[in-house]
Amino acid sequence: MKLSTKYRVKGLFHKVRGTAKEVAGRISSNRKLGLSGKFERFTGKVQWKIGTAQGFLGL
């Protein structure tokens, strides 16, 4: 598997996991969990964009 694909898959995983944490935080009124989810979702977006850029470069 190409390096760019690995980054995109990891990014997608973190985006989904972060969204789930945010929803769980809203349901349980747990601000810490919600913020953790936002940070993880942001991390996933960054990883996804890095993978996309690597794909354009052919890595």
Image (spheres, grey):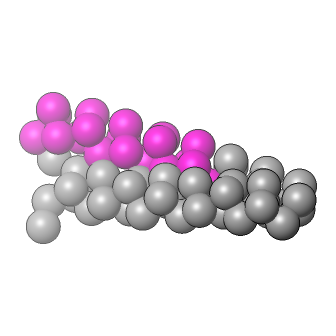
Q: Nearer the viewer, residue 22 or 39?
A: 22
- The spot of residue 9 in percent (x, y) is 30, 60
Q: Is residue 50 left or right of residue 17?
A: left
Q: Nearer the viewer, residue 30 or 1?
A: 30
Q: Main secondary structure of the magenta part?
A: helix
- The spot of residue 30 in percent (x, y) is 88, 62
Q: Is residue 38 above or below residue 9?
A: above
The part of the image, by quadrant, that contains residue 10 is bottom left
Q: Magenta segment, which residues?
A: 40-58
Q: Is residue 8 above or below residue 53?
A: below
Q: Residue at x 30, y 52 (%)?
A: 8
Q: Nearer the viewer, residue 48 or 23?
A: 23
Quadrant placement of the N terminus: bottom left
57 within the magenta span: yes
Q: Is residue 7 above or below residue 51?
A: below
Q: Nearer the viewer, residue 58 or 12?
A: 12
The part of the image, by quadrant, that contains residue 51 is top left
Q: Residue at x 42, y 63 (%)?
A: 13
Q: Is residue 7 visible?
A: no
9 within the magenta span: no
